[in-house]
Amino acid sequence: MEEMSITKTNIKQPRTQSLASRIWKYRQLYLLLLPALIYVLIFSYGPMYGIQIAFKNYKGALGIWRSHWVGFKHFIDFFTGFYFWDLLRNTLVLSMYNLLMSFPIPIIVALILNETGPKFKKTAQTILYAPHFISMVVLCGMIVTMFSKESGVVNTLLEMLGMERVYFMGEPGAFRHLYVWSGVWQGMGWNAIIYIAALSAVDPSLHEAASIDGATRMQRIIHINIPTIMPTIVITLIMAVGRIASVGYEKAYLLQTNLNVEVSEIISTYVYKRGIVDANYSFSTAVGLFNNIINIILLLTANKISEKISETSLF
Amino acid sequence: MKASRKLRRISAFDIIVTVISLVLVILVLYPLVLVVSSSVSDPVAVAAGEVVLLPKGFTLDGYLRVFQDKNIMLGYANTIFYTVVGTMINLAVTVPAGYVMTKSEVPGVKVIMMLFLFTMYFSGGLIPTFLLVNSLGLYNTRWVLLILGAFSVYNCIICRSFFSGLPKELEEAAFIDGSSYIGTFFKVVLPLSKALLGVMVLYFAVGHWNSYFSAMIYTYDNEIQPLQLFLRRILIEEQTSAEMMAGSGDEYAAQQQYVAALIKYAVIVVSSLPLMIIYPFLQKYFEKGVMIGSVKG
């Protein structure tokens, strides 16, 4: 007991300084933190104050605070609206398809590159990173031109093979494939970095021991490399699942044409059009909030499942 | 180990792995090569879809037109401005915050960290942000493109992971010598953090260079718009309309399509070239940066 009280006073010693004097002591650190704090309070938490207009009938003249409450009217309008199920389906199908392709391919790329020689690997990586640095506008511009009906190289090749020219940008059936596979093209090198880094942490003695025991290289990949990068895979997957409902609207918007809108209209492009273009602020805030809540539910669910299965979790 | 590797025969496995890698490399390179080839080809051949890999004919007319186009050059200048000034603001706001986040003994830091982390998962959304920007009088100003996104929680966490990996002894020695916190940060910590700064500059600069959505929402004045918005008009909007016109068999439209095709590819090259040249030199930094970021905070 005595010992405990001694340690207690020992711990308390530095705390005899009041909170105010400790804050004063660290004033320079607060100064370094201040710009970020101000930014977050104004530009991250400021808009959260504005979320209330999802439950109000926002009128510019009245402002956020004095606009009248309407409860869940906008949500009900959205859920019972003509577009709701289409939007939800488009959003989820596009993002699930995207996740299904964009997530495993970089892992495979990393596993394959890891088996090549160091010089070849480095050059291949440098080239595979290139598309990551291309802007979304340029990427979509490249898609539009390469798949153009009149002058696109894809149609030239189709014609060489004796097939009909297709107006891909106006073809609803083509939109999701263009969206997802251009994303794979752009991201497979960059997104492999994290796994390549994780693979460099594999203990070489494991491989030596395994090859002495007669394991083939394929077996060593499956039983040594993949288990080593598993925690990285799980964390990246949870993050990706949490972003499912916020699938890249910038790209969907750029690839959208009047003819493919039936599949390319997703919740976030709808928010942009109804909100910014039509100035329907309250309604689209409600739709955006709904989107954000779906994201959080998905993230928390993925996190819980992973906690149970692999004991890896975000929080 | 090394010697035995060198002596090892090239197996079927090696061949398969190399062939797959080569196919991936070719798939990535092909569209890039095609763009460059098309940008110097005879526009008639390009418009007819005859350029499949190597240039058909040779002309630099597309590039001449791009460099003579007032709007493109204006957008280019604006983009350079936003990238340079915006990146400096990003660094000034994000990097010091990441440093302070390593000092958990400072009262309030943990709470502020929670405050930051929360914004990664929940945000006010597009419209409330738009209304806020309007009410602050930032709409259609250069400021909005510099300030929005000035701080990045994700990058702040990367900074924090990096700083907490630095040896504590140097900082402590500086404190004993009577150095202030700010002095220590700038004179001791930052000089050890060149790799981190390299990664941050790359991340932020690429973000500024390539962004279009904020500019599309928050600005309408050509004078202050970045290159990506002009690109969007040239690449996305023109193409669709030209294609629709061409369908109606209008000769004027066909003529316009040649010019459009010329400019399109050249402008893709001109706008993407700076980053394409820079990134290979920063490869070892950003590879490290992704690794730092992957460490769970």
Image: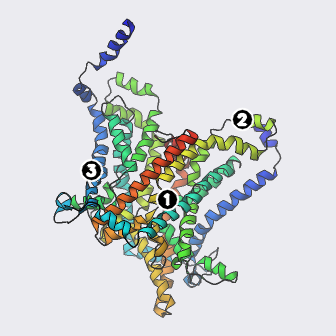
Q: Residue at x 64, y 50 (%)?
A: A110
Residue, disc 3: A42
Residue, disc 2: A206
Q: State which quadrant residue B124 falls in.
A: bottom left
Question: Both on one chain, marks 2 and 1?
Answer: no
Task: Tell me the kind of residue under disc 1.
Answer: Leu
Say whether marks 2 and 1 touch (CB < 8 Å). no
Q: Residue at x 40, y 23 (%)?
A: B173
Nearer the observer, A99 or A136: A99
Position of B66 relative to B141 (above/below): below
Q: State which quadrant residue B40 falls in.
A: bottom right
Rendered image: mark on residue B275: 1
Residue B39 appears in view: no
Q: CA distance from mark 1 to mark 3?
A: 32 Å
Q: Nearer the viewer, mark 2 or mark 1?
A: 2
Q: State which quadrant residue B44 falls in.
A: bottom right
Q: Could you tell me which chain the residue with mark 2 belongs to?
A: A
Name the side, left or right, on which A8 lies relative to A175: left
Question: Both on one chain, marks 1 and 3?
Answer: no
Residue B87 appears in view: yes
Q: CA distance from mark 2 to mark 3?
A: 52 Å
Q: CA distance from mark 2 to mark 1?
A: 40 Å
Crowdedness near tag 2: few (<14), some (14–19) or many (≥20) residues, C-alpha within 10 Å: few
Question: Residue A130 in the image: x percent, y percent?
Answer: 56, 59
Question: Residue A303 in the image: x percent, y percent?
Answer: 49, 45
Q: Earlier in the sequence, mark 2 or mark 3?
A: 3
Name the side, left or right, on which A277 lies relative to A235: left
Q: Secondary structure at mark 1?
A: helix
Question: Residue A114 in the image: x percent, y percent?
Answer: 67, 47
Q: Could you tell me which chain the residue with mark 3 belongs to?
A: A
Position of B9 relative to B241 (above/below): above
Q: In which quadrant will I find the N terminus of chain A?
A: top left
